[in-house]
Amino acid sequence: MLRVCAALTVILSGLGFRAQAAWDVPFNGDPIVEIFRKQQTGVAYTVYAAATEPGNGPLWFGTDHGLLVFDGLKWTHHPDTGSATALAFTPDGHQLIFGSWCDLGWIDFSPDGRPRVHSLREHLPFPATELQAVRACRASPNGFFYVADNCVLRWDGAKLDVWRYPGKQRLFPIEFEGALWFHDPQSGLYSIGPNGPERMFTDGLPRDTGLFWLGRKDGQLIGISNHGCWTLEPRPRCLSPRELNEFTAQYSVIGVVELARGFRSVATLTGGIAIVDSDFKIVRQIPSTGDLQGSLYGQFRGRENDLWLLGEDRLLRLESTGATTRIRLDDDPRPKFTRFISVAPDHSLWVGTENRLYHLQRAENGRLGAAAETSVRQLYTVLAEENRTWLAGFGGVILRENGRDEKRFDGNGRHAFGMVRLGQTDRWVASLNGGWMDISRSAPGQWSSEVRLNLPFFESAALDVDGALWTASPAEPPKKWIVQPDGFTPVALPPLLTAAEAAPSIVVARAHDAIVVAGNRVYRTRGAAPPLLLCKLPAHAVAGAVSTDQQRLYLALNHGTTAPAGYQDSISVLELADNGRDAQLRHLVVPQLHTVGAINRLAINRTAGADLLWIGGSDALLQTRPAELPEWSPPAPPMITAGASGRTHTTLDYSESLRLRVTSPEITLRPALRYQTQFGPDGGYWSAPGDVTSFEFSNLREGRYSFAVRAVNPIGQVSAPSYYSFVILPPWYRATGAYVGYAALASLGLFGALRYRERRIRARNLELQHLVDERTAELVKANAAKDDFLASMSHEIRNPMNGVVGLSAAIDISHLDEEGRYRFGLLRHCATHLASLLEDILDFSKLQAGTIELDPQPFAPAELLDAVSAITSPVSAAAGVKVEFALGPSVPPRLIGDARRIRQVLLNYVSNAIKYAPQGDIDVTVWARTVGESNAVVTFAVSDAGPGIPAEEQERIFEKFERGAGARSNRIPGTGMGLAVCRRLATKMGGTAWVESSPGEGATFYLSVELPIAAPVTLDTATQTVADLPKLALIVDDEDYNLVTLATMLERRGFQVLRAANGDAALAALAQHPDVVFLDYDMPDITGPALARRIRQTVQQRPPLIIATTAYSTVEKRRECLAAGMDGFLSKPVGEERLGTALLEAIQTRSPGDARHFVLPSRDSFDPLENLQTLARQHAQTLEAELAEFSASAQGEFEELHAGLAASDRTRSARAAHKLAGRFGFLHAAAIMKRALHLERLCQQGDWTAARLLATELTQDWTALHDTLARLNCESA
């Protein structure tokens, strides 16, 4: 069913008016009527019935030419539905019941909202002409009821039931207490229940007319007919005064509607309507003249408490509270330009127009009476006092006392406009065009006047508490005067009150001060104190008036071009606080304010205990009760329609145009609203407010556009925007197909041109190609020579160095004494450092390429300094330089970081200090500050007593191949790469490296890096005993070499070791109650995490520690192992320090109090044959045989890998790569192990191209490693 979401709003209640009637207020004028004729609805009609769709649905009107629908925005006519004299919706709103002449039925709605008529004429049990007219209809649980002129009918879905009431008069239906009643003058009053009519009353009812309304008063049932208002129980009695009885009898009642606060509207056929109070006294009669001229056929109260009248050729809508009315001065034939409104002490009003002077006062009947005086013309103001009235106008001032003109004061050819009494003195001042008239009284009846020229014109004036006079005019800023016996002296005012922006100005007097409105600012003045700014207005004020209680200032504001024509003016009220400083501005909604024209006067008088606000303008005079006026609120978002589609977006061809219409859902506010728009592909700025509501778009380029609009009310409040988007398709010559054609034509042209030029340049290309081949061959040859040289030199240098490092690691030093072991340790450190120096260039290139990887591990800063000291001590001793090391107390005992890289930086700093500062001491200092709970910023400083470094060189020496001037002049050897590598390593670790120095004062090199704090571990192997550790360990691994290696390390620590190659064997070994279990992550029959869960389920008493051993070192694998119930994580290759740390962390996790310090000293290098030698001793065979067996197993795993890659089998290839990673870790080949792990990830991801390339490189790495192992084996033999 069609449901238009626009809300039907009316002048008062739709804007938030309180439901408080004002029909009985004196000085009331005519109600404000809105008329809908053919010009608005589009058809000529006579309306007989109306119904409101449930919810926020539209109004439906039954006419003699089909149904009319008003949705608050527009009128829609459905001529195919036929005439209707009665309408009613079902509670769910899905069906509209109707009755007409000789017809009845119901209407439902198609999916597109069109009404579909279902007539019951064929179901009538008598000829349709006997039905006459249906007067009312209603839905009930048992069907649809219809009240016709002479019968009642019920449609139960299958048949029509009929109750006949023949007689001379028709039946009169009544809505009462939520049910449908009807009055049959011949038989009585009936209520229609679910099963049909039930007679309620018979006695005392009128016989010659019907009842039009039922109600209750003081518990009695009462009704209204053409004889007035009568009680129906316990006995008939007339309740209404004679005035109402005569009114109803003369004009024929057609209906009664309840209004607010007990008022009722009694509508008649030809006499208009009467508003009656709760005692049925007529408080207002609106005759059938003017707007109400013609016959009325019905009335009803709308959803928003507005009063609708159904008439001939028109519909009328009345403001139902009477809070705002229009004052008509009917005897004045010319336009009512209100020149002034003056309130007399008795609260009567003097109103002056262009041609008349009116005295508005309460008549004997309590209503407004307007007495016109035609003898007085061309007046500009009236000053009303007790028993005295001053009339200022053409030619001067007239004094009227006790109703008679007593004296005329001549203005010497000038006209009088404004007038004010100077306090309680006998002195008055009138404003003339060109001066002032000073009028005074020296004794009763003795008057004098003097025209003082060259004084500014004013329209309003007021006295301050100190007797100073304030004047104001529409064209000038306000002015202040000191009143003196012989004239007026101007007073200097602040610049804000004298600037041009301070005009127009208004002055309003209060009991204890004056209010000055200068431009758009409001000031309070009191004596000699500077004027106090109360508020800033959104527009200039053109008129003002103070409430009778002095607490509110009413202002008429003119918004100029920012408001639509006729709505430039608005009414605002300034609430004045008792403290005289604070003020709150509110903007009031005054119905039909635009009918006043340009506002020029405001006045307040009090009657019936409430203030009345009088608004005079160029076209009319309105009277309203300001206490019942709501405030302006932002308007509702406007509605955008494109034709009849109702869509909010569309797609148009390039040649099409689009027309959009903008309307407000608040129908009564439409004349007061203006609209701002945004348009463009990306929105844009809001336009200035305008009256345009129709927009047409044509000749737009292709693209997506968005049109936005928002409503602006007269005081500048804006609504939320509404949007409409549309797409303009490109023209055919810019469409995609056209561009394809253009490309084809261009391709053909280019092809021809290319074929032509090809022959010309082919010979030249052959020449160039020959030249390029020659030059390329030379470059390839030179590059190959360079590669051969680098490879040869690398081989020649690395081989002996590898032998030095390898042999130092392979020599058994257990038989040496403590001093020998110490010296041999220094040999190992020096060999390792020498090898690292050879990698500086490679490190720098990796740093530049971003490929270098850090290896953060737990380390002790003290051990790091010991290593640096041990390495540098021979050089420093030979140079005669003393190197002092100091470790600050704030440095944590253990940190996590790449100790090798930190040591590399420190060694570079110390070596440089020894070279550049041959005398003096060198201090190596370390301190730290904690960051949070788990990190520390550690700073390493190396200070020397050398010649210092100039400021301009301190940054340059950290660049590659850059050396200081001192190094070049003193011929100190070096490559200029060390400090560059240091800075890049510092940046890689997230830290900084810098130098601080002054010439002649030495230099200090710094390295600062933020590192995590590791768990504290004290190297105290002297106190370590077997009793401190678990005694029985179970190793689960499917590779024998891993079992042997880990078992050897554990046996050194005093463990008894059990071995298992699969999950079943591991579960069986649990019967021996091992204290710790080492689980390989990846085994053929079960994974390490899965086996850990089974162990946790199996062993409930004294559960063992479980530590994962795997070549994986990612955070994800570590989390998976810990989540499976493991206590620690040990990544391969397994070393003594890693093993001890893993055991300690696991014990601390399980029971921190049982932890012991058993970590062995770390090792900087490993012998590749070390684990193979251990394995050979376990197997009781030679190292050569063990190496051959190990190589054969590795070769089988390589074959498995290549087979999996060839078949694109992720599981098979990944498992083979993982096994190979474990083998390389067993041999301490960390770099090759990482590549194998990378290969495993590629296989798991299915990246076969990269995996196959990496597998080929891994095979080559294994071949080189195997050759190295074989050579080392021969050398060791």
Image (cartoon, rainbow, N blue to C red):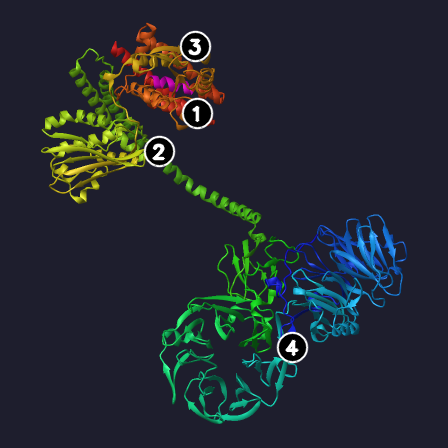
Residue at disc 1, secondary structure:
helix
Mark closer to the chain start, 4 or 2:
4
Residue 159, percent from left and from top = 85, 49
Circle 1 is placed at which residue position?
1123
Per the rendered image, the range of residues in magenta is 1217-1226
Alpha-carbon distance for marks 3 and 1? 24 Å
Circle 3 is placed at which residue position?
1071
Mark closer to the chain start, 2 or 1:
2
Label 4 amino acid?
Arg
Residue 112, percent from left and from top = 70, 52
Instruction: Say the numbered circle drawn on residue 546.
Output: none
Mark closer to the chain start, 4 or 3:
4
Residue 972 visible in image: no
Label 2 amino acid?
Asp
Up-down relation of residue 1246 to residue 676 (above or below): above
- Asked if the magenta segment contains residue 162, the reply would be no
Label 3 amino acid?
Ala
Q: Are marks 3 and 1 in contact (CB under 8 Å)?
A: no
Circle 4 is placed at which residue position?
367
Which quadrant: the C terminus? top left
Q: Is residue 185 left or right of residue 499?
A: right
**Secondary structure predominantly adopted by residues drawn in magenta:** helix
Residue 757, percent from left and from top = 45, 44
Residue at disc 3, secondary structure:
helix
CA neighbours of label 2 inside 10 A, class few (<14), some (14 to 19), many (20+): few
Front residue of this view, candidates 38 and 1175: 38
Front residue of this view, candidates 628 and 965: 628
Instruction: Say the numbered circle drawn on residue 773.
Output: 2
Q: Are marks 2 and 1 in contact (CB under 8 Å)?
A: no
Mark closer to the chain start, 3 or 1:
3
